[in-house]
Image (tube, helix red, strand yellow):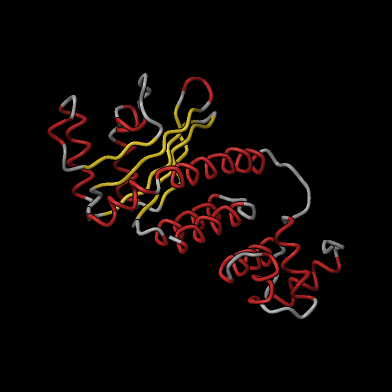
Amino acid sequence: MKGVKRACDEFVDCLHSAHTEDDFRRVAERTAHALGFRWFAYFGHRANGPKLISSYPKSWTSHYFREGYDNIDPVLQERRNTSRMLLWDGREARSAKSPRERRLFDDALSFKIRTGLTVRIPASQNQVAAFTLAVDDRSLGLERFIETSQDMLQTVGLNFHAHVSAKIGRTSSGGIGSPLTQRERQCLAWISDGKTMQDIAELLDVTPRGVKFHLDNARRNLAALTLPHAVALALRQGLLP
């Protein structure tokens, strides 16, 4: 359980450094694997249509929208007294409320998307956003984990939605400011002082992988070729504390 909590703490920490869809995809995919799931998917709403960030096969997501399944998917439909957390199993197609919904379950199974959980998140204009963790098979261990970790898994979904809603919209609107987050600047500053990734992890109470994630983002955001180059650019631009 300690490893699970650490994975979730790292997830929240890394969200602060995520800016683009690719950043968010990497963070969520790594956390999904750490928690024992194969895929994740986030479905939200934008002014120009639905927004999907996921690690599902692109062939499945293209098929999903082409068939209009987002309009009938049970996890996305608003219903009174529906739990924030839904556990679902694609093999229960017999419980489908229409032939089309049954075909959705069958098609998901053909892509080996068998079971998972979805955190439903109230969004604007009476719509629902959803954060899903899914696997290609169901196990007793997974069921027990989900039962004992529902609050934590719901927090993961809510945090992801909050950061995506705030940052994707702001980035696409052309907002300007520092190319680095506070955490990225902290990590680069410690590197400039000769600290190792392990040192920084202990100082910031995160994992070494989390530190590497921030440093990789900083290097990419500064268009630096190497980590020392990123430090040099950050110092030259007066970005380090």
Q: Is residue 158 above or below residue 7?
A: above
Name the quadrant containing residue 183: bottom right
236 or 121: which is nearer to us? 121
Name the quadrant containing residue 199: bottom right
Name the residue furthest left.
94
76 or 104: which is nearer to us? 76
Residue at the image position 35 percent from the left and 59 percent from the top: 36
189 or 56: which is nearer to us? 189
Residue at the image position 57 percent from the left and 52 percent from the top: 12
Residue at the image position 45 percent from the left and 59 percent from the top: 4
Q: Is residue 65 above or below residue 228?
A: above
**x, y (%) of residue 234?**
80, 66
**Quarter of the image containing the N terminus?**
bottom left
Taking the image as shown, residue 5 lies to the left or right of residue 88, namely: right
**x, y (%) of residue 230?**
74, 71
**x, y (%) of residue 215?**
66, 68
24 or 83: which is nearer to us? 83
Q: Is residue 123 above or below residue 60?
A: above
Q: Is residue 157 above or below residue 80?
A: below
Taking the image as shown, residue 176 lies to the left or right of residue 110, namely: right
So how many labels did they put on this image?
A: 0
**Quarter of the image containing the C terminus?**
bottom right
Taking the image as shown, residue 70 lies to the left or right of residue 126, namely: left
Name the quadrant containing residue 188: bottom right
**x, y (%) of residue 118?**
37, 40
